[in-house]
Image (cartoon, helix red, strand yellow):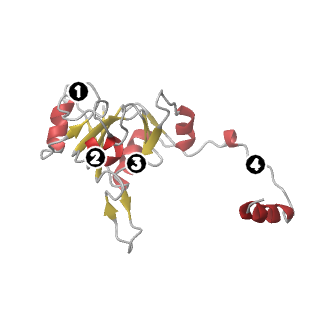
Amino acid sequence: MSKKEDILAKFRKNVIKKYDMPRLDDIKGITYPDPLVQFISMTENVGGKVVELEKGQDINQLIKELYPDAKEIASNLPEIIIATRNPDTVESPQALNGTDVGVIKGVFGVAENACVWIPQTMKEKAVCFISENLVILLDRTQIVNNMHDAYKRIEFNDYGYGSFISGPSKTADIAQVLVMGAQAARSATVVLV
């Protein structure tokens, strides 16, 4: 038996009273009068930005306006014609290094914490994390209230990978100084379509 198993066995031997695990299907989670309004507010609270695509507005023009200095734009979405890199056709994830803007599509958003479910829909998922700025296209009608609702909706495709992304990457681990873009994108913009 390993040292870890020895320690756990001692704990188990000294348990005085056992309790049944709670039934998770009985837990409903928080709900909001307007999940979209809450999602927008939470996105801003976590350092992200929300932009609503107006009817008839060109998504490519909007991205150019949001990131006028961007030279390298990565996306495999057919509607993003300004993309200079395609994560499906690059030779390796390293080829996406130096991407100014990554444009991806979210399946649904979560009002409770501003997370967006991003299943892997491209060969190189690094675009979600290596891009300096991330643009997430999201259908405004696909916002759920909480993570309980979100977990019920998660589906994986052939890649078998997905991630929740909420705002830009940030940490304050070192000297309690907030650093944006420490592990991933420096900025995250959700474009509601």
Disc 4 marks which amino acid?
Met
Labels 2 and 1: the sequence-earlier one: 1
Work out how far the residue at label 4 is from the one at label 1, CA to CA, in angstroms: 49 Å
Which residue is depicted at the point 19% across and 38% down?
63
Which residue is depicted at the point 18% across and 41% down?
72
Labels 3 and 1: the sequence-earlier one: 1
Work out how far the residue at label 3 is from the one at label 2, CA to CA, in angstroms: 15 Å
Q: Mark 1, residues whose alpha carbon is within 10 Å: few (<14), some, or many (≥20)?
A: few
Disc 2 marks which amino acid?
Ser
At which x and y percent is residue 30? 55, 46
Quarter of image, res 180: bottom left
Nearer to us of marks 4 and 1 is 4
Work out how far the residue at label 2 is from the one at label 1, CA to CA, in angstroms: 27 Å
Disc 1 marks which amino acid?
Lys
Q: Quadrant of the C terminus?
A: top left
User: Quick one: SS at disc 2?
Assistant: loop
Q: Is residue 34 visible to us here?
A: no
- For residue 166, the mark is 3
Q: Mark 4, residues whose alpha carbon is within 10 Å: few (<14), some, or many (≥20)?
A: few
At which x and y percent is residue 77? 29, 28
Labels 4 and 2: the sequence-earlier one: 4
User: Quick one: SS at disc 1?
Assistant: loop
Residue behind mark 4? 21
Labels 4 and 1: the sequence-earlier one: 4
- For residue 55, the mark is 1
At which x and y percent is residue 84? 18, 35
At which x and y percent is residue 6? 78, 63
Labels 3 and 2: the sequence-earlier one: 2
- On screen, residue 112 above or below 81: below
Quarter of image, res 78: top left
